[in-house]
Every structure is written in C-alpha cells, then in structure tokens.
Amino acid sequence: MAGSQDMFDAIVMADERFHGEGYQEGYEEGSTLGIIEGRQHGTLHGAKIGSEIGCYQGFAFAWRCLLHNCAAEKDREAAIAAPMNRFALGRLPRVTEGSRDWQGLRSKKMKVLESLIGLIEKFPYDDPTYDKLHEDLDRIRGKFKQLCSLLNVQPDFKISVERSGLSF
Amino acid sequence: MRKRTRSRPVSPDSHSPPRPWDRMELPALPAAGGCVVASVMSWVRASPLVRDPGEDGDVFDEEADESLVVQREWRSHMQRRVKVKLRGGCGGALLRWVRGEGRGGVKKEGYRDGIDAGKAVTLQQGFNQGYKEGAEVIINYGQLRGTLSALLSWCHLHDNSSALISKINNLLDAVGQCEEYVLKHLKSITPQPHVVDLLDSLQDMDLCHVVPAEKKTDEATDERLCENNAEFNKNCGRSVNGVDGSSLECCRTQEHAHSEQPSLTWILEQTASLVEQLGVSIDVLQHLKQL
C-alpha cells in the first residue's frame, strides 16, 4: 500500500519537476527572446524619433546659421543684399507687413527658430518612457511648421516611404 | 412521456450519425427506455430527408423521440465525469501519462509557460535598450538630412542653379541609403552575446567557416551602396582606419560604426564643398561636427 502511494507520489512529483525544469529552460530562453524582440521594435521606434528630431535639429541649426550669415552679409553690402532679401521675403503671402520690415521679420524668424531649438534640446528623444513624449513631440512639430511658413519653405526630408509614418 | 419534445433544431449538422460505440452505452441508460433501433429511428425521423416537404419553415421537430435528448445529455455528463476524475488529484499526471505525453509533454508545457514569463519580463527592457540605441545612432543622420534640407530650401529661395539643387538631392538620397543600411544592421545585432554561448553554438553548428563569408557579404553590400559614386570606394579604404565611432556611446555598435562611417564621411565632405559653392559660411555645418 505504502509502495503504491510512493509510486503515485513519484508520478505527481515528476509532473511538478518536469514542469519546473521546462519552465526554467523556457524562462531563460524567453528572457533572451524578449530582449531581442523588444530591441528590434525599440530600435525601429527609436530610429523614427531620432530621424525626425534630428531632421528638425539639423534644419533649425542650419537655418539659424543661414539667417545670421544673411544678416551679416546684409550689413556688409546693404545695397546689394537688401533687394535680394526683399525679393525673397516678398514671396511671403501672409506676412505682408513683415516683409516691409525686414529686421522685424528676421527677428520673428529668429525667435521661432530659437524656441524650436530650445524645445528640441529639452526633448529626451532617447527615452521611450518619457511621459510627455507625444505632447512635446506635437509641440516641436507645430513649431517646425510655424518656422517653415515664416521662412516660406517647404522642406522635403526625403524620409523613405517605409518609415514615413513618424507618428506612433 | 410528453408529446412535445424540447425545442431542437433539425439541421443535419446538429445530429451526429450513430456511431459504433453508441450501442455499447445505450443499454446502460437508466430510464430512457429506448433501444438502439428507437434511437436511430428517431434520428432518421428527425432528419430533414424524411420530413414532410410542406413544413420547410418549421425548425422544431414535433414528433421526435424524447429519449434521444436524454441519451445525449447522459452521455456528455458521463464523459465530463470521467474527465474530472482523471484530472483531479494525481489525475493530471495520470491523464497526461495516459494520453502518452509523459515527461516530454509536461516539460513542454512548462517550457511554454517559462518562455511567456521570461519574455514578459524582458520585452520592455529590450525595447528601451533598442529605442535608445536607435535614436542615438539615427539622430546623426537626421541632423545631416535636416541640414541638407535647409540648404535645399535656401537654394530654392535664392533661385540657385539646378545643378546645385540636384546635387543636394543626391546627397539627401545617399543619407537615406546610409540610414537604412545602419538601421538594418542595428536591428540584426543580437544583444551582448556571451562568448561561451557563441563558441558553443559555433561548434554545435559547425559554422566556423561561414563567418568570414558573412563578413564578405557585408562588404559586398557596402560596395553596392557605394557604387553610385566612384569616390565612395576610395573613401571606404581611407576612413575605415581613420574614423572611430566616437559619437556612438554604445560599444556594441562600434564595429558597425566602422562600416557606416565611410559613406557618411564622404557625404559630409561633399556637403562641405557644396556649402562653399553656395557661398555660405562653413559654420552652417558646425553642429554636425560630432558626427
């Protein structure tokens, strides 16, 4: 009787043991798989954000320099540079008053530009757990659009079709 | 016995045809009082083949023998009881042994549970890790892309020559290609492989001779990427030694930084010469210095 009890115990315990062994193996394998799978998704999303933020950053920095450059040039060769700039700014349909006041418009551009750069530099682009990620990203996007319309440009970052869906 | 049976649809699907083992169970029926023939007959009667074609719309069988329902209920009840008995107590193990799964089955089940649990724990960790890496590496390409776009829009505003504009466009495309290439590599890196594991699996798989071949494929891809421009190749050789991926914090991406760097340096050089041609101060590329 005791023997048969042991036998059943062995069977019951074997069940537990085999399950436990399998679980342990599976857990290790699953941990590795989880890291790999998570990394793959994370890399894609991180790259999307990095690409978008980098674009804005590069664009903003370059334009800041171009505007400075332009101003210096204007100061140096006021007679030649002014009509050219006026021509360029004259194409702005919305800012008619500003286009007459070149200095005023330039300072407005610079203001928006600096505020965009400030937003970007504050943005923790490499932290997916940042709780205001979407909120801040939207603000950056909005600021960027505002800057583009002020500059009267429509930049094409040539982000490939496959990854064009920058919102997630 | 009531005349009307419980409402029961008569679609042929709802009645399984009489099976051989029905005969075994039926004599044990307590009070149904039906015999096999009766049961089969009621089934036949209930089937639409024998039904009066006039009562097409009627889904209830008025004449069927009630015993069939009772039989079926009793059968399913018994089946459930047997299963419960086997599952209860040590029955779980017994049932599996009986089902022939034995050790392997239990282990497999544990393994599956383990995989799910392990994955759940590390998935987010892996995601965060990959996110950081992807963002840190790709932001450099984004910056270059943004700078080129700024120059392009500048050119459009100032009606620069179309030759310069198409050059910027080409550079933008090149940046896109680099980016894609780097991203592909980033995704395929397995995280922190342990040397022992690697050696083990290499030995197990007898793959030692394949590894150099794989490297060659990488180089081939590099060159294919470069072949749009003859200058690419010259630069490949030159800058592999000269440039290190200092901007990339992650040491795991270092070796990939080498393969990504050549064309990137080339693009940077081209951009610098382009800026000169535009008559813009080279400061415009200052923020790219960290590349």
Image: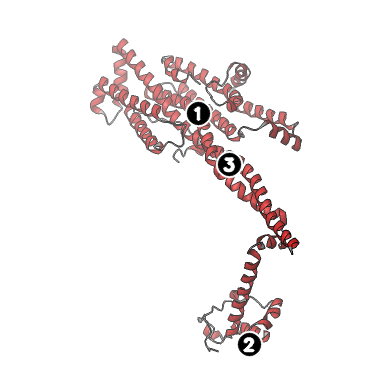
* Marks 2 and 1 in Cβ contact (< 8 Å): no
Residue A129 occupies quadrant: top left
Real-space Cα separation, disc 2 to disc 3, in angstroms? 61 Å
For badge 2, the amino acid type reads Gly
Name the one closer to the observer, B26 or A153. Answer: B26
Q: Which residue is mark 1?
A: B136
Q: Amino acid at mark 1?
A: Glu
Q: Which chain is disc 3 placed on?
A: A
**Towards the viewer: B253 or A100:** B253
User: For this view, does B99 lie left or right of residue B144?
Assistant: right
CA gap between label 1 and label 3 equals 22 Å
Q: Give the percent coordinates (x, y) of residue B121.
A: 55, 43
Q: CA distance from mark 2 to mark 1?
A: 80 Å
Comparing marks 1 and 3, which lies closer to the viewer?
3
Residue under the point 43% across and 17% down = B278
Q: Which residue is mark 3?
A: A34
x and y, in percent, of residue B239 in the image? 60, 17
Image quarter in which the N terminus of chain B is found: bottom right
The answer to whether residue B172 of the structure is visible from this angle is: no
Q: Which mark is residue B33?
A: 2
Pair 2/3: label in front: 2
Name the residue furthest top.
Answer: A76
Residue at the front extreme of this rendering: A2
State the residue at coordinates (44%, 15%).
B282
Q: Position of residue A149 (x, y in %)?
A: 33, 31
Q: Is residue B174 above or below residue A21?
A: above
**Callout 3: 10 Å neighbours few (<14), some, many (20+)?**
many
Say which mark, if any, is on residue A155.
none
Left or right: residue B130 versus residue A67 is right
- Regarding mark 1 in the picture, which secondary structure is present there? helix
Residue B1 relative to residue B210: left or right: left
